[in-house]
Amino acid sequence: MTWRPKLVALDIDGTLVDGSNEMSAAVRDAVRAIRDAGIETVISTGRAIPGVLDTTGKLGFTEGYAVASNGAIVFAYDPVDILHAVTFDASDAVRRVMEYVPDAIVAVEEVGVGFRVNRPFPEDEVSGNFTVEHIDSLIAEPVTRVVIRSTDHTAEEFSLIVDDLGLTGTNYFIGYSAWLDLAPDGVSKASGLEHLTDRLGIDRADVLAVGDGNNDLEMLTWAGRGVAMGHGPDALKDAADAVTGSISEDGLVEELKKYL
C-alpha cells in the first residue's frame, strides 16, 4: 500500500481492548509503533474522558489528542484541556424513552469527572466518579451526553423500542448491550475528528479510522480510509473501505502493520 495516513483515529472498545477492557501486547506495541513513526494517533470513542485516560494509560501515552463522548468532546491530555464541547437539551428525548422503559438507568456526563446518574450502573460498565440524583435534576440543564441503559431488555428489544420512538433533535447510537447514547444533533466521532483535523491542518483524506460499532459508521465513512473490525455489524463492514480481523484476532495490528 502506497497510501500512508497522517492521523490514525482508533475506537477503544472492541478495537483496542476486549470486553474485559484488556489490551493485548501486540495491539499496544503496534499502536506505539505508529506514534513512534510520526503518525498522529488519536483515541476516538464513545467513552467519557476518564475511560479515555484509562486506555491512554494502557498505551503508555502521556500526551496527545482524543475525541470522547461520541464526538461531543475533543480534548488534549495530560493534563486534560477541553478544546471543543457541544451541549444539547436532552430532556424531551429522555422523557420519551423513560415512558417505555421506566426502570432504565439514566446518566449524564460530568465532563472530565464521570457521570450523574439516577441509579448505579452494573459494575465495571462505566468508569469515573458517580453522583446519584433525581432524574429531573439530571436533565434540567444542557449536557454533552446522555446514556440510557436498560438491564431488563436485550439489545434487540431495546433497539426496537428506540427506533419506534422516532427521536428527533438528537443523534443516537445503540450499543451491543441494551445501551443508548444520546448526543447533540449532528455530533458524531466524525464531527469531533473534523474539528481536530481542522485544528491540526490535516485533511480527512489523510486519516485512517478503525472501529467496530454502530457509533463508528460516520467516522469510517468520513475518513480517507475507514476500516471495520471483523466482528462488527454488517452495516459497518459494508460501509467500510476494508475489513480487518476481529478483536480476538488482534485485527487492529493487521491494519496498522501496513504503515510500519
Image: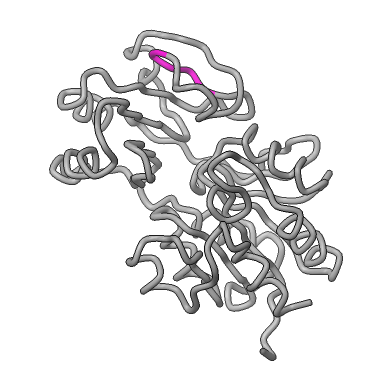
The quadrant the N terminus occupies is bottom right
Q: Position of residue 12 (x, y in %)?
A: 59, 49
Residue visible at 51% across and 44% down in the picture: 46
User: In this picture, which residue range is highlighted in magenta?
Assistant: 115-119
Q: Nearer the viewer, residue 25 or 28?
A: 25
Up the image or down, 221 lies above or below 199; here it is below
Q: Nearer the viewer, residue 29 or 133?
A: 29
Q: Position of residue 58 (x, y in %)?
A: 75, 43
Residue 62 drawn in magenta: no
Q: Give the residue at the far right of this rendering.
A: 36
The quadrant the C terminus occupies is bottom right
Residue visible at 74% across and 60% down in the picture: 26
Up the image or down, 218 lies above or below 244; here it is above
Residue 169 in the figure: left or right of residue 210: left
Up the image or down, 245 lies above or below 17; here it is below
Residue 211 in the figure: left or right of residue 208: left
Q: Give the residue at the far front of this rendering.
A: 248
Residue 258 in the figure: left or right of residue 46: right
Counting the numbered discs, the total is: 0
Residue visible at 35% across and 31% down in the picture: 89
Q: Nearer the viewer, residue 222 or 257?
A: 257
**What secondary structure predominates along the stretch shown in magenta?**
strand
Residue 248 sits in quarter: bottom right
Up the image or down, 102 lies above or below 206; here it is above
Q: How is this picture coloured?
A: one colour
